[in-house]
Image (cartoon, grey):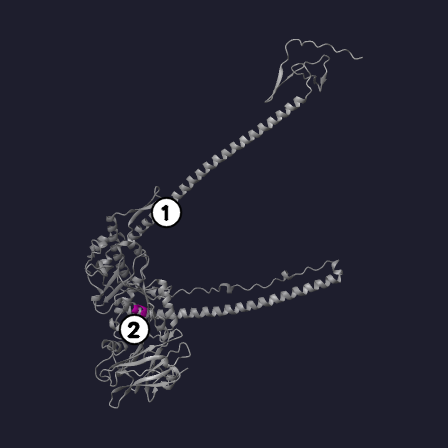
Amino acid sequence: MPAARAPARPLPGPLPTAAWVIHPSTFYCCRAVAPRPGGRTRGGRPWTEGVDVAGRRNNGVLAVWAEAQRQQQRREEAQWRAQAAEQRRQERESRESQRSAARGEREALRAYQQSREAEAARRTAELDSRVTELREVLRTGLAQPAFRPAALLTPGQVPPFEPGRLGVPVPMPDQAQYHVQPPDAVQSRNPAIRRQYEEYLAQARARFEQDWYRAQAAEADRQRRLGEYHQQYLAWVADHRRQDEERGSRTRELLERLRGGEAEAVQEYFTAVLYASARWPEGFPHNLVAAWEASSRELVVNWELPGAEVVPGAARVRYVKSDDREAEVARPATERKALYREVLAQSGLRVVTELFRADADGLLGSVVLNGFVRGIDPATGREAERFLLTATVSRAEFSALSLDRVAAVECLLGLGGKLSARPERLDEVKPDRLPQTVGGSLAGQGGEDEPDLFEMDPIEFEELIAELFRARGYRVMTTARSGDAGVDVVAEDLDPVTGGRIVIQAKRYRSTVSPTAVRDLDSTVRHHGAIKGILVTTAGFGPGSYDYIRNKPLSLVTGPELVELLAEQGLRGRLGPAPQGRPGSGPAAGAAAAAGSGGATAEEPGGAVRLEISWQSRTVGGDPVELDVSAFLCASGRVLSDEHFVFFNNPQDPDGAVSLHPTHSVAGQPARGAALSIDLARLAPGVEEVVIAVSTEEETPPALPLGYVHGLAVQAALGSAADGPERWAGGTAGIADTAMTVGSIRRTGAGGWRFEAGPDPVPGGLAGLAARWGVSVE
């Protein structure tokens, strides 16, 4: 039987040290049990038994629960610690991001401010560079090589042939790209696969051949176009060289005249010297007038100087951080005034220097330089030339100067020159001598014979047009020959109310200017923002051109009108060869006589008459029906020659006796008109009759009958040159033809002339008229 259980005895001594497990709601105590007698162990450790505080054995349930609670608490604490760590990490990152953003903003602000400061420094450097450039006007001119006549003979550079894409051959097809993979040994035993391979191979071969032939054709076309383009290039080179040879021939002729001391050649050469002057500061004009006096070997030049605005008003630019703006620090007024006077003095000395250095043949004995600016004349309130310096420098005085070491103002005054004390206020000095006081003409104008405008060099023609408008009170400059954007001359009307820029095109043509040129002028006017455009030609314009300019800021000047304008300003020019045996009776003289007498001369028979033909146009299809006026210089019922047929494409006969003035609006009337000026004394001896005719415009065929035009009338200003009615107003009502004669001026048996008016319809328009009077019609 089992042994009896010994009764429980009190534990001897104090309780062993207890280990407490704390839970939020309950305390548990486990006593460490001393090893039982016998030394039994569990797992090598002393055997212990868990008992509660009452001494009962623990069954382990609470311990497991307590351990679970403890693990749960540890997990919650770990989660809380992780969340706290994550929160602290996010807070650290946020603070770091904020610090980084603030640092970035500070850096961005610092970079922005530095860029503004750099911009202010750049502008300051530009101001300093501009002032340095102004202080070295004379030094810069001395550093340039002296102009030599040989420079005028330098041929223009011919650019090499550049075929562009035409120079790239067309690539031929690569046969490898058409390769068809053959079947292997096993597949080749299959008849279907072999047939399919052969089909693919045939297709690839066909594609290759097709692409090859196409590439060959493209290459042949490329070579053809390349050859054509090269031929065009060769033709252009030949024309360029021909022009160079012509220019060289004219230049050599000029140099021969220059060495002979011819006034016009001297003026032209030294004018070219100053025009070719380079490396002037920006904003400095290049306008001048020159005159040469051969007897004293003195060249008188009016040279335009820059205005006071070329001196910067600011000394430096600084950046104000507080207002985030750039502020200009003003240059002291005394410094601006002193610098402007120095600029004027250096400019004057440089002009004199360049003239003497270019005089390799020793033509110049002295130079009179008058420097002017354009400003308001206080006496008239209008813009005028205000002379700010003048100096007369002899060759001996110039040779004694060391210009690289002089003080410009003191040097100019030491040469006896005069410089305005207050040039910024346009206080004038009295010029020593003006070009207008020199005998002869200015800047290449002059000569005993009237120049033929048809034969005039294009550049000379443009200069003549510029001189014409300059004489009429405009400020004028000519444009560069290349890149002129459709403008030959730019004139400025200085009127403060109605003034502005005017663009002028000069057409030295023998045939009628096409309406396309007029439309191009209109586009040029808009492009340049000009107030007006003027097209000047030695020929004439068709009715379509006059229709186009209606209600547009455009004006057309024909050859005869140009001759009249030149004569009004004391300039000379004629259209075609001068008549033999009639000195001084060129077109300019005839036109000036007609203009001076209001269109007719009341002198002996053989004077000039003027016929005004006017009409009122009806509108058809939105376009007015206009008339072309023509004249036939006839003998025995036929024109003397095709050149004696005067119409819009040939506005004057070879002798300059009959001139057709262009169609225009009649002042104060709703009518259109054209005029014929006839100098009976200049008619060829064989002319028996001058027939006047009209025809409807044929630019938009078919031409309409004359019945669409009403109010046709002829006003004759005959004076004593001829007799006959002074007015005819027969009208055109019911006329179905497109042309008719309106009258003629016939030679009488007594040697006089008589105007006879009367309509005679002619079918076929202008061509019908030409055929009737024997003009060859192509």
Q: Which dot marks residue 637?
A: none
Q: Is residue 629 left or right of residue 43?
A: left
In the picture, the disc for residue 119 is 1
User: Residue placed farthest to the front in the image?
Assistant: 25
Q: Earlier in the sequence, mark 2 or mark 1?
A: 1
Residue 703: % across, % down = 40, 79
Residue 431 location (% of width, % of height): 20, 60
Residue 515, x across and y down, in percent: 38, 72
Magenta-colored stretch includes residue 149: no
Magenta portion: prevailing SS class: helix
Across and down, in percent, residue 41 comes to 71, 17
Q: Foreground residue, 19 or 120?
A: 19
Report the quarter where the N terminus lies: top right
Dot 1, how many residues are within 10 Å of its Cα: few (below 14), some (14-19), or many (20+)? Answer: some
Q: Quadrant of residue 210?
A: bottom right
Three-letter amino acid code of the residue under disc 1: Glu
Is residue 350 shown to the viewer in this render? yes
Amino acid type indicated by mark 2: Leu
**What residue is shown with label 2?**
562
Q: Magenta segment range?
A: 460-465
Relative to the observer, which residue lies in front, 379 or 448?
A: 379
Instruction: Pick the quarter of the image with the C terminus.
Output: bottom left
Name the quadrant containing residue 345: bottom left
What whole-number distance in Å separates the C-alpha atoms at marks 2 and 1?
Answer: 54 Å
